[in-house]
Amino acid sequence: MRIDILSVVPRLLDSWFGESILQRAQQKGLAEVVVHDLRAYSTDKHKRVDDYAFGGGAGMVMQIEPIDRCISALKAERAYDEVIYMSPDGERLDQPLANRLSTVNNLIILCGHYKGVDERVREHLVTREVSIGDYVLSGGELAAAVLSDSLIRLLPGVLNDETSALSDSFQDGLVAPPVYTRPAEYKGWKVPDVLLSGHEARIEAWRHEQALVRTRERRPDLPGAASETFGEG
Ligand code: SAH
């Protein structure tokens, strides 16, 4: 998967993609993230990318030309499955959407700033708008990093244990069961006996039951909360 991110503050994204799982995914050749500075596509002699809003009002608006020039240059190189604009009024990111988008080959993600982008960008250049939640950030970079991370960790081979992403919260309509590691007892606080039993089927049943209990307590809105009964019957 290749992700091209368009930004007016590209440095904001450096550390995010330069460390840990996302860095390893790129080193293994499973994902490629390329960040583009929109100022490089400005034809203005001061490299401006924004201007005052027509009709007045506070806040600058990102201009269409640098965005169009950048997207056109990318599209001349390869076909893109989606051009996504990160926007608080877009479709809300959730695990099913991340699952679907993780199967595409090439993605452009546009980060807004200031008051956002000229509406004609949204009408003519963007194929999808995604929000990471009902709150407003000062720029789209964090949101683009959230979206990219949620996709890249799903690519086969990115996580060491391939089944790991599948057992995360939301994948089966349930939240994840609790996890423990050594020591088995700390200050008198014990790990549940079943996890130390070595009995795989019992451990699996316990985990499923815990996921179900947690989902019912915390997220009764998820499909898994209603649809299943406890494993061992
Ligand atoms: N005036 C706009 C907000 C602009 S915030 C409005 O009221 O809707 C500046 C930029 O940050 C946006 O263009 C968008 O790219 C990004 N952004 C802010 N909040 C976001 C969110 N919840 N999800 C995705 N992107 C967001």
Image: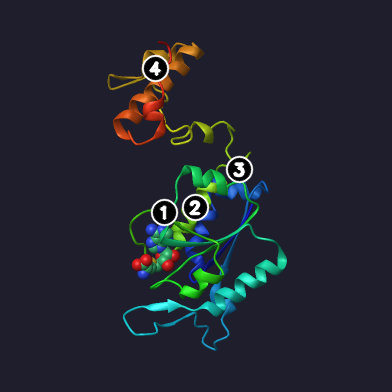
The first of marks 1 and 3 along the sequence is: 1
Mark 2: C-beta under 8 Å from nearest atom of ligand 1? no
Q: Residue at x 53, y 36 (%)?
A: 165
Viewer-closest of 41 and 188: 41
Q: Earlier in the sequence, mark 2 or mark 3?
A: 2
Residue that label 3 marks: 155
Crowd rating for badge 3 (residues with CA inside 10 Å; few <14, some 14–19, many 20+): some
Q: Is residue 70 above or below residue 130?
A: below
Residue bearing mark 2: 147
Residue that mark 1 sits on:
132
The disc labelled 3 sits on which kind of residue? Leu
> From where the camera sits, is residue 175 visible?
no
The three-letter code of the residue at mark 2 reads: Leu
Mark drawn on residue 94:
none
Numbered-mark total = 4
Badge 2 vs badge 1, beta-carbon distance below 8 Å: yes
Q: Work out whether mark 2 precedes mark 1 in sequence or the reverse, and give the earlier one.
A: 1
Of the pair 24 and 92, the residue shown nearer to us: 92
Classify 110 as above or below 104.
Answer: below
Judging by the rendered image, the residue that carries numbered circle 4 is 230
Amino acid beneath label 4: Phe
Ligand 1, what quadrant?
bottom left
Label 2, label 1: how many angstroms apart (C-alpha)? 8 Å
Question: Alpha-carbon distance for marks 4 and 3?
Answer: 31 Å
